[in-house]
Every structure is written in C-alpha cells, then in structure tokens.
Amino acid sequence: QQQQQQQAEDAVDGEVCRLSNAKRVAVQVYRGAPTISFREYYQKDGQWLPGKKGVNLNAEQFENLREKIADVEIKIDIVAAGNSESEAVCEIGGNKRVTVSKYQG
C-alpha cells in the first residue's frame, strides 16, 4: 500500500501505467486531441517532467498498434530466440513504425 501511495504522489498528468520508474504511459490532450504518450520522465525539484525520449500516438495510430499486438508478440519471439537482431512489424501512420530489436545496452 505504501508503494501505491508513493506512485500516486509521483504520478504524471494523465498517467495510465508505469513501465519502469521513469518510463510512463499517459493519455493527454495535445492541440485539442487525445494522445497516448510513451515517454521517459526525469525528476527535477521533486517534480516529474517529460523528457525528450518517447513517442506520442494519436488515437488512430494507437488503434493501428493495438491491431498489430499479435504480430509484435511473434516478432518478439523471433528476436528473443536469436533468429534475428531486428524485425519490422508494421507502419502505424504519421511516419511511425513498429520494430522489435534486440537491446544492445
């Protein structure tokens, strides 16, 4: 319960979930339209602020991504098995595409 309370206090506007401490998914309004933001945040003066690393999807792009989740999972298995370093999945619109790659860390 203490962890949930801490997460609520650290939440960013429109936060839906956390992928890690700094990586967040949020639904926000941009230029009057809803956007889904997958973004890294950083902490400054006790406040979480959006960083440059991330991507915003409009509703149509997000729906295109949702329709391709099964294909993404297949490509994850291919890359995880070592059969490929990178697998293109699909274009989701607005010059955005989904690719599954092996993390080079």
Image: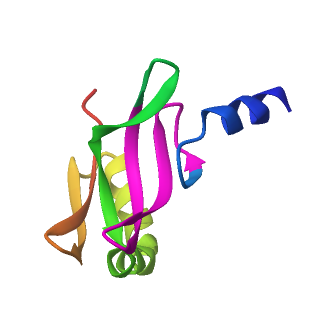
Q: Position of residue 65 (x, y in %)?
A: 38, 73
The image quarter containing residue 44 is top left
Seen in the picture, residue 23 relative to 94 is either above or below; the reply is: above
* Total count of labels: 0
Q: Looking at the magenta stretch, what is its main secondary structure?
A: strand
Report the quarter where the C terminus lies: top left
Q: Is residue 30 left or right of residue 66?
A: left
State whether residue 87 is above or below residue 93.
above
> Percent position (x, y) of residue 66?
45, 75
The magenta region covers: 17-41
Q: Is residue 39 visible?
A: yes
- Percent position (x, y) of residue 72? 38, 66
**Residue drawn at (76%, 29%), measured in percent from left and top?**
3
Task: Report the residue that reaches farthest toward the right.
Answer: 1
Examine the rendered structure and indicate whether residue 4 appears above or below residue 61: above
Task: Write down the quadrant of residue 51 in the picture.
Answer: top left
Residue drawn at x 54%, y 55% is 14
The answer to whether residue 103 is above or below residue 84 is: above
The residue sitting at 41% across, 34% down in the picture is 49
- Using residue 46 as the reference point, say whether residue 37 is left or right of it: left
Which of 92 and 48 lies nearest the eye of the viewer? 48
Query: In screen coordinates, is 49 left or right of 25?
Result: left
Residue 85 within the segment the image draws in magenta: no
For the N terminus, the quadrant is top right
Percent coordinates x, y for residue 6 in the rendering: 71, 29
* Front residue of this view, candidates 44 and 52: 44
Nearer to me, 84 or 101: 101
Q: How is the image coloured?
A: rainbow
Decide if residue 102 is in sight here. Answer: no
Residue 24 is one of the magenta-drawn residues: yes
Which residue is found at the position 29% from the left and 54% from the top?
55
